[in-house]
Image: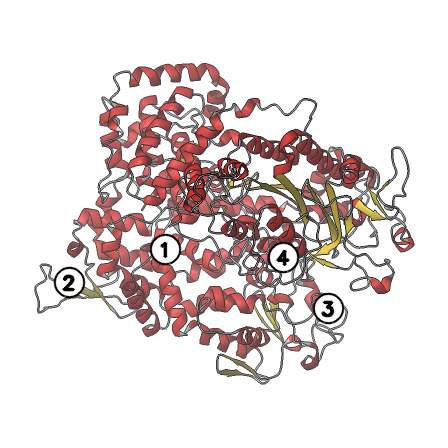
Amino acid sequence: MRQRLWLILFVCGCFFVLPAARSDQDTGRVTKRFPYQRAGLSDRQAAACLLSRFTYGARPGEVDKLLEEGIETWFENQLRAERSDEGLNQYLNKYDALDLGNDSILAIYRNPGQVLRLAIKEGVIAPDSVQKGDKSYRSDLMKYMSEKGWKAPQELQRQLVGQKVYRSIYSRNQLQEVMTSFWFNHFNVSATKNICALYIPSYERDVIRPNALGNFNDLLLATAKSPAMLYYLDNFSSVASAPSAKGGAKGRANRGLNENYARELMELHTLGVDGGYTQEDVTEAARVLTGWTVRPMGSYAMGKSASDRSGRRGFASEAFIIDGDFMFAERRHDQGVKNVMGHRFGPQAGYQEGVDLIHMLANHPSTAQFISRKLAVRFVSDEPPQQLVSTMAKEFTKTGGDIKAVLMVMVESPEFWKEALKADKTKSPFELVVGAVRNLNVEIDNPNQIYSWSNRMGEKLYAYQAPTGFPDIGTYWINTGALLNRMNFGLALASGKIPGAQVDLLALNRGHEPESAQAALAQYLSLILPDRVPAINVSRLEPLLTDPNLHEKVEQSASGAKLDSSMDWASSRKKNKGNTPKQPDMLAQVVGVILGSPEYQRR
Amino acid sequence: MITRRGFIKSSGMAVFAAGLSGGLPTFVLQAAAKAFNRPNGPKKTLVCIFQRGAMDGLMAVTPFTDTHLQAARPNLFIAPGAGGGGLIDLDGRYGLHPALKGFERLFAEKQLAIVHGIGSPNTTRSHFDAQDYMESGTPFRKGTSSGWLNRLLENGHGGTISPFQAVSLTSALPRSLYGNQPAVAISNLQDFNIQMKGSKTGAGMAANSFEALYEQTSSELLRNTGKDSFEAMKMLQKTDVNAYKPLEGVVYPRSALGNSLKQIAQLIKMDVGMEIGFAESNGWDTHFNQGSTNGTFARNLTDFGNSIEAFWEDLGGLQDQVTLMSMTEFGRTVKENGTGGTDHGRASCNFILGQDVNGGVVYGKLDPLAKENLEDGRDLKVTTDFRAVFSEVAQSHLSINSSSSIFPDWTGTPLNIMKV
């Protein structure tokens, strides 16, 4: 264990709490006590609040565990993200693609259309059978693929989604996973763009997650050099415009300067739309980044033709910088002088120009503001107080983009706790479904079911088409269709009707069955939303639940249901290996209503 | 915060607030009573169908007199011919693919217009990028956060919004509808309900509980949306959504598109205030064995044509409220490729159907398909910017005056496809 130095600071003034502080060996800064008491929160409430903001939801008993560890220590440990995760790894072991590099992924996961063409070319499948439109050729195609050791890209997508759900539910480094989602969304790429889809597993694993609690400059540079981003925003194809490029730029439609990445780099990744740049700066930045592309790899990836594009003399003799999957191709780079926001780049400084540009943008004051505000929107409020954002931005600048330090200074701010009291952030669909699974201690065999519920409520992971990422604000998530789905999700999960999600509501209450619906409501509210502030007002619900005939009604409908849906029950039990304890129906109903309630949609 | 309340009330109020006292012309009163979604005009619905994958416009609507085309497509070209199998001659120059025989009558009745040579000024041949640009409505900007249909809504109404103002019959919200205006993506109307598998009573009781909880929550957003949700649910419950019967004799294809259009027709008939309905049709990326009168493309086009025809018949007397417009991200190469298909090209064609449409005309400009007239020597040139057509159709049908924010960079002139 790391040693911590405890300091006692004597502060002149009238604080009730003597602020304790300690140094953090990573950054050398001193952690202050979090000022939650001044906002009127108890220790337990502060712990519950941290769990609701920085994890995917509190597991049963987690408030107590956190208090045992100490509130500040817990947060520091989450920032460090060094907890061992054997429990999680047991779930991840069933996937075989999670450790594959991009070369292997490209070799294994093949585009069905191209496989079909190849199979026809090799005479494995008769062209006529495809034209007829019958499905018989499909089995031949499957056989052909398995002989070659190829798999469909959907399988990779299934594993990508599965691992994300499992990590979010079971990782002990919860904040790292939350921040991975945050940065993925900030630097969004989309699986809906085919040429980028296969690179997403490594994008999340190698680019985002390792830097999620690191330094912003490193993270930005890593995204800029990643195949997923290079393909998604087209920089892979951006070459110097004809006059200054030596190579022939003839014929090909995608030849020439492409500004897409340069624009989003400034507008979405760093400065923000009002961050003080012009269209001219965008064009100049695009010129700086010409030649930033993907190294040739795979048998059909666009990267393969990069060597063709590089010129007649061939790949080996060219000036390239290769770093992992990234390649800087000197020939495609604009050799002239560029000027971005008053900073001069080039001439002829090659790869380093782009690195310097990214450094300049990462350290720009607008970036400090923009990123700090976005973090505050994620963790505090849709409309965060400007004072808090300024404090964070100052820390961002002071530490050169140390993400840990910015998060720490946020939680040390009184504004954080004042806002936290309001519990006014709307959970995103993914936070809602994973949070419910964690709150109820549900055992998940089929993570893709959880994913599909999130989709239905409007958050389809890895598939948001625009580079803006999902807007992380309540008005985006909450609409009529999505809201009904949120309620239905609660009912479905609590009543054990989601395949591969085993719920044991009684175990949650240590096997004790509540005597009435009213008692159930009270007990399960405090189990599911422990120490929640503000207290949840259920007075309007009670008359419904105290209906003397309630139990009877539910039982009736439930027994009717068994007749209606005997097949459903049988099949879902089978999938659950017969282990699912039958939920008392009244209880399922009450818990379902809690999960679908407006207060549960907030954190 | 957006005000999401007060459907009928405020539009009725608007008339009186305008200072008209007594002796209101009948048509004003009727309009006010009818139009709860649009205070200033009769209720209208724009239905958009996105054909994803890039439809071969030259095969759907063929300039059959063009000898270059015949030469470029030895296996794919279809000649005009009466009876089954041949192109349906529209005007001596263009012919409809035989799969679209239902469109022949609509074209003759001048309800259906076609625009040929339509496409994007951005020359990308990537499905993703081209769809993205078309749906955001900004062909050179990726970062536009909203879609053009959502911005259309922003321009349209005066603060009174139906929960069904924009409905996409898809599982996820399409890029066209991203934005600040509430829009619903739902692939099946049956799902718009509180459900508890196997327990109807349980579901009903849960619904009551939820309604009570959402009424009293302190969050304005959740309270208002909750109220809208239950109101919307009740709107749908007035009729048995599952037991929907189209008009006598109308048969929708049992396909994704057929199903979507059937549900859009349902919503229009239920009078729920839908201004925009959105549906998708997939499978247009015909690189391989496209077929001619039969085959992949013909099957897809049959579904497309029959779905639209059924929808239109099913609307019956409500046709005057609806304009339908199709769109696709780009067209396909003039020349057929080595595997009996076509590759990614530039311009395609689209269809606009409605009683406000100056139909019976193929709009746009197609030069002879000689190599020197093609874009990059291979593709049908884009001669009509998609924004010219989208903005005219949408604005005219929904009576919207300002187009500047719908297509921010667009300043072109309309083709006069719509009656003014």
- Write down the residue under mark 1: A378
**From mark 2 to mark 4, how far is it between C-alphas?**
54 Å
Please name the amino acid that badge 4 sits on: Asp
Q: Position of residue A155 (x, y in %)?
A: 58, 44
Q: Position of residue B62 (x, y in %)?
A: 83, 47
Quarter of the figure with residue A573? top left
Front position among marks 3 and 4: 4
Q: Where, quadrant-wise, is the N terminus of chain A in this rendering?
A: bottom left
**From mark 3 to mark 4, how far is it between C-alphas?**
24 Å
- Write down the residue under mark 2: A20
Q: Residue drawn at (74%, 57%), measured in percent from left and top?
A: B346
In the displayed structure, B347 sits above or below B282; it is: below
Q: Residue drawn at (42%, 29%), measured in percent from left and top?
A: B194
Q: Is residue B130 visible?
A: yes
Q: Secondary structure at mark 4?
A: helix
Image mark for residue B129:
4
Q: Are marks 4 and 1 on the same chain?
A: no
**From mark 1 to mark 3, how far is it between C-alphas?**
44 Å
Q: Are marks 2 and 3 on the same chain?
A: yes
Front-most of residues A121 and A41:
A41
Mark sitting earlier along the chain (2/3): 2
Q: Residue furthest front?
A: B23
- Write down the residue under mark 3: A308
Q: Is residue A167 visible?
A: no
Mark sitting earlier along the chain (1/3): 3
